[in-house]
Image: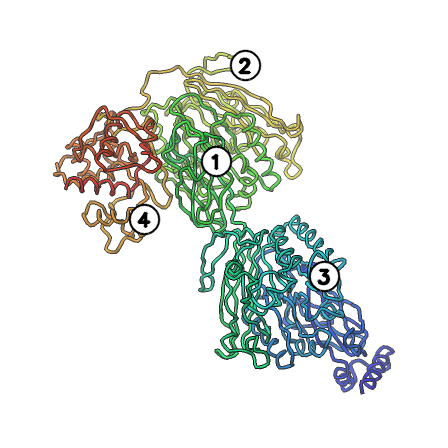
Amino acid sequence: MRLLKYITAMLLAFLLATGSLNAAGPVLAAESLDAAVPVSKVTVTFNGDPKTSKGFTWYTPEASQDSTVQVIEATYGKAEFDTGLTFKGITQVSTNSPLENVHKAEATGLKADTAYYFRVGDAVLNVWSEAGTFKTAPASGAFTFIDLADTQAKTEDEAILSSETLSKALATVPNADFVVHNGDIVDNGIKEEQWNWLMGHSQQSLLNTTIVPAAGNHEDENYAFFEHFNIKPAAGSATETGAYYSYDYSNAHFVVLNSNENSEEYADFSKDQVEWLKSDVTAAKAAGAQWIIVNIHKGPYTTSNHATDSDIMGPNGVRNKIAPLMAELDIDFVFQGHDHIYARTKPIKSDNTAAATAKFIESQNGKSVEYTVNPDGTIYLIPATAGPKVYYKNQKEALGGDKYYDLFERAEENHAAKYGPDPSDATRPKRSQVQNFVGITIDGGKLTAFTYEIDQNVNNAAPYLVDQFGIQKDVGVSKVTVTFNGDPKTSKGFTWYTPKASQDSDVQVIEATYGKAEFDTGLTFKGITQVSTNSPLENVHKAEATGLKANTAYYFRVGDAELNVWSEAGTFKTAPVGGAFTFIDLADTQAKSEDEAILSSQTLAKALATVPNADFVVHNGDIVDTGTKEEQWNWLLGHSQQSLLNTTIAPAAGNHENKNNAFIEHFDIKPAAGSATETGAYYSYDYSNAHFVVLNTNENSEEYADFSKDQVEWLKSDVTAAKAAGAQWIIVNIHKGPYTTSNHATDSDIMGPNGVRTKIAPLMAELDIDFVLQGHDHIYARTKPIKSDNTAATTAKFIESQNGKSVEYTVNPDGTIYLIPATAGPKVYYKNQKEALGGDKYYNLFERAEENHAAKYGPDPSDATRPKRSQVQNFVGITIDSGKLTAFTYEIDQNVDNAAPYLVDQFGIQKISSTGNSGDTPSNTGGGGTKPAVPTTPPTAPAAPTTPTAPAPTTPATKLKDIDGHWAAFAINKAVELGFAKGYADGTFRPNQTVNRAEFITLLMRAVKHADTGKALDFKDAGKIPAWSQSFIAQALDAGIIAGYNDNTFRPEQVITRAEMAALIVRAGGVQVNPKAVLSFADAKDAPKWAVPYIAAIKDAGLVNGIGQNRFAPNQSVTRAEAVTIILGLLQRAQ
């Protein structure tokens, strides 16, 4: 009969080929042919690049000699193969079924991430499989796959069971891109009927998925494995016993091993295969693979019968020889088969011990998934069985008992054990009762797995979840910046980014005394975490270190203490109380490509190397080219990370980072009240004898182009206050400055009726601003002193030699000097020649106003209106020493002297010293109003402002929701009960929020219940004192507990320090003071002299002990929790 079918098929083929028979005509003949020459056992595999290729295998009777694959994009919902692509393959006689032919072919040159229809068969005989579907791999992005193992079946009924597991898996995980099989596909590989059973009953599933199989020991002979799958074995792979190979999918590299080889060195593996594994993984990592995943049948870490086999635990066994190699190669995840039980390990290190792990829990599809973070070892999984066969858990002493099982997260008894022993073999659980499979998704650095179980006796054998787990890789710290936040003498602000897995924000600092960062003995500060606005897969972390010593070098690191994820150690130095200091000024690092960002990062690195004593770096804005494109921050901050870890940056927002919080999220600064942080921020800080004002030219108003009216009013009051506090220098950092010499100098927002030159420049002179640092115009220029009428002042000058260079100093300039330091990045402009600018009349306002130094390299190929990009960069080193400012401007020409910086300008300002205040002091010496010369403004999270707006906190109707577990929870609840403390309207108490003068006095006077005086407050800033605190401040003034300042201000928003708190508590409680007291705290030298008796008094009274390590931290700010705790102690003492 078989011979007759063959002869019939050949005759029909001949007639078709010669044209004697119309292919479309004999319908009955075609039907007879399909029946005579069926296409069966079709599998779709990876062969070549999964983005552009697929492999196909199928079987037919011998009559079919042609191997053809036809594919067409699944665009129109119908498979019109005559308009698609056709690929030819090879045909050979099956080794184990000699009356069948094996056909293999590859489809190549396909589109990535594209769905296709396909069919396989014989184009000559017009015999085809049913249409199937597949999808090519994406170039990147998330993907999902299924893992299962051991479908081996002894009977056709058991094979039907295994095929149902595959079908249910694909239905349960419908977005699976492929199926990984961990081997033992059939029970006896050389019995072709077993392949007929399994693949026949699985044909619909196999026609619509890609399978990625490993060879099991049940298909280890006579090419039984290799002939059924069109994979591309590695060179040297022994295909008679199976195959080893690898493939890439998105950001993951998959390695499929063959544990059916053997050698003297390695049980189950040849030496060649092990060497290939090493080189393959090394090459994959070098190519950028983020994940390395291995599929192996005989795995080292299982929990059933085979766990004690000699080829697993013997001297050259897989556990002793291959497992350590997995860890050494940084293999992330290993899929295993062979042992027919569910188990998964902790991360296993190269010494075969379990690594300590950090974890977090996240909700996925309504289930809590526990993720292991940055595992220091390889995690192994065996997904139990997708077929009938099961084993009991291994209890042999040789395995090691608890010592071995402690390596596992899941190592329970086989779930089929509850059905008792199998009737045919009492050493094993009953067959065919329980099956499992796993759905796995990889998305960036996150792997999430859901394990499903099918119990034939439960819920109509529908799959249900039995385990969920994950791995979060690359939870690294990136984009670290160090900024001024609070008093630069005692505080620092820190910002960093992480994947969303990291929820904690921790900063650790330690004095850089011994040359080594031993953070476990240092100080730790907590911060805030929020999702990045422009990079929603990342968290932004901000935290402040406070209570530091002035003029002191520190090591620091930022990260997540819970996950033990940290940045590299960095360094910073707090500001001195007084004395000379140096900083770097640069601008416009904006880059359109990563190569350009590298250039900008090199400018910063060279600046820090050229000016090694720089205490900080001022950036005049346009940090990146498009602030809402996070990759540009990744480029610049990433390539600048070593520089940024070792300096403090004081940035202004440029117009290229003016949207969607792009600026503020990268820098932990303390914006002024009312600053529109969506577009940037305006703020100020003091450093030694200088006051720096950073403006935001991304606001706008009818009165002022580029500025809101509020910002201008703030500028006036801020500068006035700084001068009153004794600032000798006022320096402004502004992106869109009024006096530049290139394209933007004639923009309407600069020179229009309400432009910056028209409206803001006169104000600079009126406010006696000394020096303005500008950006935006990408050219080097500096002015003479500009008066309020926008003319240049006459000047007196002298020349002095500095470092062998002649520096020309302007003496007591009667106006403001403006500088634009050109660009620190690639972008440059030509000098502005427009008539509207005014020609010589305008340029006579400048000391330096030459053509752009990059002009000599001609126009840029992409824009002839600008000089060639990336040729010339600049930065300025500036030193202020008392009344003298000295500046050295450096240039980097990429075509000169290996791009080493060289001087192109040097200048200075000499101010005649005055005897004005170095900082006013309160009239109540040694009292609650005492403050350092530079106001202390401790950091606060943007979401939790230091000063609550009216109305004041109210007594919540419900339990305070943010104090559970807080160290001061009892004291807070007691304070609320007594009525002197209240929560906020949203039900929070905000225990870690700092307290200002108005708030602390309100808490204190409510507690001591002093009589209301009814007196009005007559301070100059009485309008800033909240209504809810006015009567309490009047009471405190009447009782002599607090006083105002010499300039008749109260400064209600100024934050209370611990030293000030001590004085207020002592006075309010009538605690006895010893004027000659000596402090025993380790940081006693940091305490203001006036505060020493008060600190000693509250310590002796038992009201306070310190903050740990025998420190009092007198200049550290006070939190709401600390305030109510010490006030409660005062009340208890009085009782």
Name the spot of residue 605 as percent of width and height, x first: 56, 32
Q: Which mark is residue 966?
A: 4
Residue type at the position of mark 1 = Ala
Mark 2 vs mark 3, CA separation in Å: 79 Å
Asked which quadrant contains residue 523, the reply is top left
Q: Secondary structure at mark 2?
A: strand
Q: Is residue 201 above or below residue 514?
A: below
Mark 4 vs mark 3, CA separation in Å: 60 Å
Label 4 CA crowd tier, 10 Å (few <14, some 14–19, many 20+): few
Mark 2 vs mark 4, CA separation in Å: 61 Å
The answer to which of marks 4 and 3 sits earlier in the sequence is 3
Considering depth in this image, is 33 or 1063 the residue closer to the camera? 1063
**Disc 2 vs disc 4: Cβ atoms closer than 8 Å?**
no
The answer to which of marks 2 and 4 sits earlier in the sequence is 2
The answer to which of marks 3 and 1 sits earlier in the sequence is 3
Label 2 CA crowd tier, 10 Å (few <14, some 14–19, many 20+): some
Residue type at the position of mark 2 = Ser
Q: Nearer the viewer, mark 2 or mark 3?
A: 3
Mark 1 vs mark 4, CA separation in Å: 29 Å
Considering depth in this image, is 364 or 372 the residue closer to the camera? 372
Q: Which residue is mark 1?
A: 517
Q: Secondary structure at mark 4?
A: loop
What is the count of numbered marks? 4
Q: Which residue is mark 2?
A: 806
Name the spot of residue 602 as percent of width and height, x first: 59, 33
Q: Which mark is residue 262?
A: 3
Q: Nearer the viewer, mark 4 or mark 3?
A: 3
